[in-house]
Image (cartoon, rainbow, N blue to C red):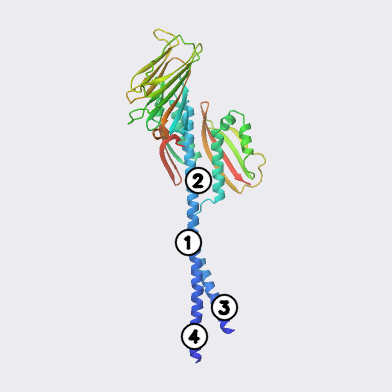
Amino acid sequence: MARGFIFTLDSLLAFGLALAVLGLVIPFYDTTSFPNHEQLHVQRYTSDLLAVMQKTGQVRQAISGDDSSMMGTLIQTSAGKCFVFKAVNATSSAVVITVAKPGCGGEPTVVAAAASNEYYEGGFYRLELMGWVQ
Amino acid sequence: MRYDRGKSEAGRGFVATFVTCTLAALILMLIAFSQPSLSLRDRYLADYSGSAVVRQLFDNAAVQVGAISGINSSFTPRFDGNVTSAFSVALLSASPSSALSSYSSYLQDNFSQAASAVIVPSFGPIASGHVDLMSNTTDFFVDYNTNSIGFAASPGSAGTGFSNLSIALVIPDALNESTPWAYDESGDVNVTLSVTAANVTTISNGRMSSSTPHYYLLNVTSGAGGRSVMVYFGNSGAGNGGLQVASSSVNGTFSANATIPYALSSLWYYNATLNVTKAAIARNSKLMVWEGG
């Protein structure tokens, strides 16, 4: 009985020692942070979505005033993901058009942004697409 | 006796402590070795994502250069080991030099900030009024200063490498007269020329030697200072298989489909470079339009 008690006490002391060592090691551990997988996924999704909207001509259409195709694309994106597109005239810095996916409210948990540019009818436009997960 | 028993218990205690410490050290080592590999994976994914963003930046810059220059191009690999390269551009276009210079400045200054990157374009060669869209062997050029369009052998290449060349000219004016070229059946390139004008449509086809000169002249108005389109195929000085379509005040569109072996045309790029540094990713290369596929 006494021997078992000593073994248990001994093990507990060793375990406590191990925890203490662990506690000392963790603060020195490399804490360099990288975006987690969800952040990377939203970033890639946002970046790819902007590229698709450019390559299919939806960005040019939206700059010319017709955002119906772009809105259709945004509505078809995954549920829970929200996007806001903005085209800014590179010369005047005026926002030419803003297109937002409907039904997006609440607090975002993960936010990503993509930027590109478009030449259209003699003018340059800076394109911004912000994406987030609700 | 008691002394011996105490010694034996102390020995057991030591073993138990040693085993516990070993297990604890093992757990610590497992944690320590698993954490860095997780970080490396995240670092790899982050780098991959960053490189994809840089790649999209290059792709988009090439698309915008094409839009500014008014050049449409597409490349379709075929099952027979060839690539069909299609190009179209207006016969008379305003020089895009100024717009290309503005785009270069915009990328370097304003857009660098928006993209959180350092972007240094070198558009010098194409911003001088002569845009080249090149592969290893073939150079599709548009010279806005002389209103000429065509193909030449790329530097270091003996020829354009065409096996088939299909040219289409659409001219909104009526043709006054035309002087067709002669085909030679022993030629090495199958050439088709389609001319659509307000008053006539002609299609001619046959083989031509890529090393001898062939001329096709289309006159809208005759005489000195007349409006015309001259089409030349043959040796261009830079190599065999050159094509030049020169417009003298004639509007319209030029389009061409060229069949070239895949090995000679798996890369097409503008003669302009972009140097982009974004976080840990750096890329300095030509503006690629097509990279195989």
Give percent across and percent down for residue B133: 42, 29
Say which element carries label 3: helix
Give percent across and percent down for residue B250: 45, 15
Location of mark 1 (residue) = B33
Location of mark 4 (residue) = B8
Gap in angstroms between the C-alphas marked 2 and 1:
25 Å
Location of mark 3 (residue) = A8
**Of the image marks 4 and 1, the number of the one nearer the N terminus:** 4
- The answer to whether dots 3 and 2 both sit on one chain is no
Q: Nearer the viewer, residue A65 or B249?
A: B249
Question: Can you tell which mark lies on residue B49?
Answer: 2
Q: What chain does mark 1 sit on?
A: B
Q: Up-down: is B201 above or below A17?
A: above
- The answer to whether dots 3 and 4 both sit on one chain is no
Any part of residue A24 in sight = no
Gap in angstroms between the C-alphas marked 4 and 1:
37 Å
